[in-house]
């Protein structure tokens, strides 16, 4: 049974956390599913934008306490944190723009998940916060790193050190979210924004996202390699070299 659904329609990849009975709280299996689904989205040529949301009345209540509270310190660090990082990194680094629909509370790991998106739409009834230190643990999935780059360090201090929770209106003022929609209408707002991308060049959008990620400190090495690789792969020298290899000859790159 998968707890992360993927449906692609009219260029939009709908990525849905589907564990509503637990407010979409994240487990190890869900993180594994998320990583695999992100790989599918990355390779799906028909997917031009991603809408991320949660089933039921929550976006994501964070990491399921039952899933990690009994882990040894070694397993907590080695698997829960590291594997979670892999999944969230894959989401943040998708080539497609990602819109998160906060259709319910985004707490702890849920906020860290939302921080991976390029744009966040909050429904007007939600609350946002980083409650982990109240349990004696730190925000572990870049809740102090990527979130600081995306939202600014001071607002994180208020949530993480002092336990403040923010309403949708407060989150908009603080830059935690980009738009507010009435309850139940977050998806409609996201789909309207997603359809606007029909009028924007897909390659230019992909390259612009990569360069923004680079400027922000997200995946610097991969961005440089990908940009240089794209240039090299489009140059006639590549075909010349491959043709020579197939013919068991040495290429003469000076010959045109």
Image: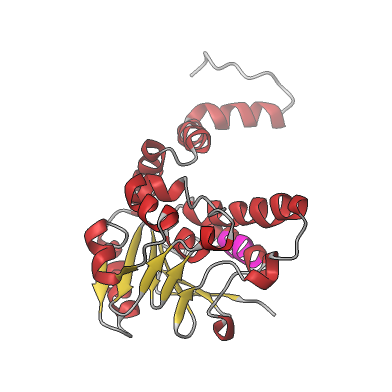
Residue at position x 61%, y 52% in the image: 86
Give above or below for 238 relative to 60.
above
Quarter holding the N terminus is bottom right
Residue at position x 36%, y 54% in the image: 158
| Furthest-top residue in this view | 254
**In-front residue for pair 255/134:** 134
Left or right for 212, reference 196: right
Residue at position x 51%, y 50% in the image: 142
Give above or below for 43 relative to 192.
above
Give above or below for 209 relative to 105.
above
At which x and y percent is residue 154? Answer: 33, 47
Q: Which residues are magenta?
A: 33-38
Magenta stretch containing residue 150, yes or no? no
The answer to whether any part of residue 96 appears in the image is no
At which x and y percent is residue 233? Answer: 51, 35
Main SS category, magenta section: helix
At which x and y percent is residue 3? Answer: 62, 76
Left or right for 57, reference 150: right
**In-front residue for pair 83/13:** 83
Magenta stretch containing residue 34, yes or no? yes
At which x and y percent is residue 149? Answer: 38, 44
């Amino acid at each position: 049974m998968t707890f992360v659904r993927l449906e692609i329609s009219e260029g939009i990849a709908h990525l849905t956390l589907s564990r509503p009975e637990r407010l979409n709280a994240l487990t190890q299996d869900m993180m594994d599913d998320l990583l695999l689904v992100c790989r599918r989205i990355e390779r799906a040529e028909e997917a031009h934008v991603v809408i991320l949301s949660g089933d039921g009345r929550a976006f994501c209540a964070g990491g399921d306490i039952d899933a990690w509270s009994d882990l040894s310190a070694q397993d907590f660090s080695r698997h829960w944190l590291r594997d979670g990082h892999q999944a969230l990194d894959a989401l943040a680094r998708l080539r497609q723009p990602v819109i998160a629909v906060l259709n319910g509370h985004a707490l702890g790991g849920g906020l860290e998940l939302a921080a991976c998106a390029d744009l966040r739409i909050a429904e007007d009834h939600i609350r946002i916060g980083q409650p982990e230190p109240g349990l004696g643990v730190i925000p572990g999935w870049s809740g102090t790193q990527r979130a600081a780059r995306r939202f600014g360090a001071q607002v994180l201090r208020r949530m993480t050190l002092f336990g403040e929770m923010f309403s949708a209106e407060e989150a908009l003022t603080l830059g935690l979210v980009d738009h507010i929609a009435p309850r139940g209408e977050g998806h409609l707002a996201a789909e309207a924004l997603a359809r606007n991308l029909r009028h924007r060049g897909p390659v230019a959008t992909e390259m612009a996202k990569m360069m923004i990620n680079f400027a922000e400190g997200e995946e610097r090495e991969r961005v440089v390699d990908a940009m240089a690789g794209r240039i090299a792969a489009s140059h006639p020298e590549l075909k010349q070299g491959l043709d020579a290899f197939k013919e068991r000859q040495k290429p003469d790159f000076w010959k045109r």
